[in-house]
Image (cartoon, rainbow, N blue to C red):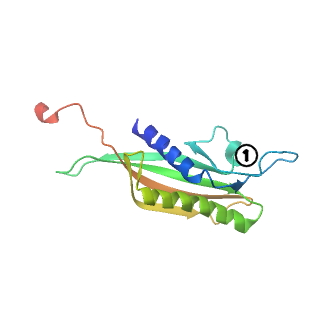
Amino acid sequence: MTPFVLLDELKKFVEAETKDLLLPVRLERGSTGPKERAPEVFTMRLKKSAEKTSKIPYVLLQFIKSEDSQQPGQQVHCESWVRIIAATYAENEDEGALSVLNVLTRIRLAMLRAGIVGRQFVLRPPLEMIVYPDSTAPYYLGEMMSVWSCPKIESEINWKNIF
């Protein structure tokens, strides 16, 4: 369950950090919807492939992998990798590239400041960030790769008594 909890806590964290960030929304002709809004935050995937552009601006949190390891004489160490994708829209290419950078930087700084999410997941270096230079205007993309130290799962078996 830990990856589910991690994604849920990260979603709450990112929503709180980006709720006041207003970004341009692409409106269909004749639409009277809002011209700006905060990015929506999704986990793992968008519901439909068509939403890859219609839901912009958004942040997508994707669980990539997790690893449990133990060095001799050390405690079990659990880590999970989460990819954070930001997608924005802008007619002006300079504004578009800067808006995706702004979203990622806001999340990055908040995570570095907090260092912990959900009172149990600790951010581990490195925190990698990239803004794609070849984004297809008017859509702009970037991502971060984050590594989180997770609570260890204890075995219910006392291995010392077995061997």
- Residue 161: % across, % down: 11, 32
Picture layout, residue 130 above or below residue 52:
below
Q: Is residue 135 left or right of residue 156?
A: right
Q: Is residue 85 left or right of residue 138?
A: left
The residue under label 1 is: 54
* Residue at image location 49% in from the left, 58% down from the top: 110
- Residue 114: % across, % down: 43, 56
* Residue at image location 69% in from the left, 46% down from the top: 55
Image quadrant where one finds the C terminus: top left
Looking at the image, the residue that sits furthest to the bottom is 94
SS of the residue under disc 1: helix
Picture layout, residue 27 above or below residue 137:
above
Residue closer to the observer: 104 or 81: 104
- Residue 49: % across, % down: 67, 41
- Residue 99: % across, % down: 66, 62
Looking at the image, the residue that sits furthest to the right is 30
Indicate the quadrant where residue 93 lies.
bottom right
Q: Is residue 24 visible?
A: yes
Image quadrant where one finds the N terminus: top left
Residue closer to the observer: 107 or 56: 107
Q: Is residue 134 visible?
A: no
Q: Is residue 45 left or right of residue 82?
A: right
* Residue at image location 64% in from the left, 50% down from the top: 39
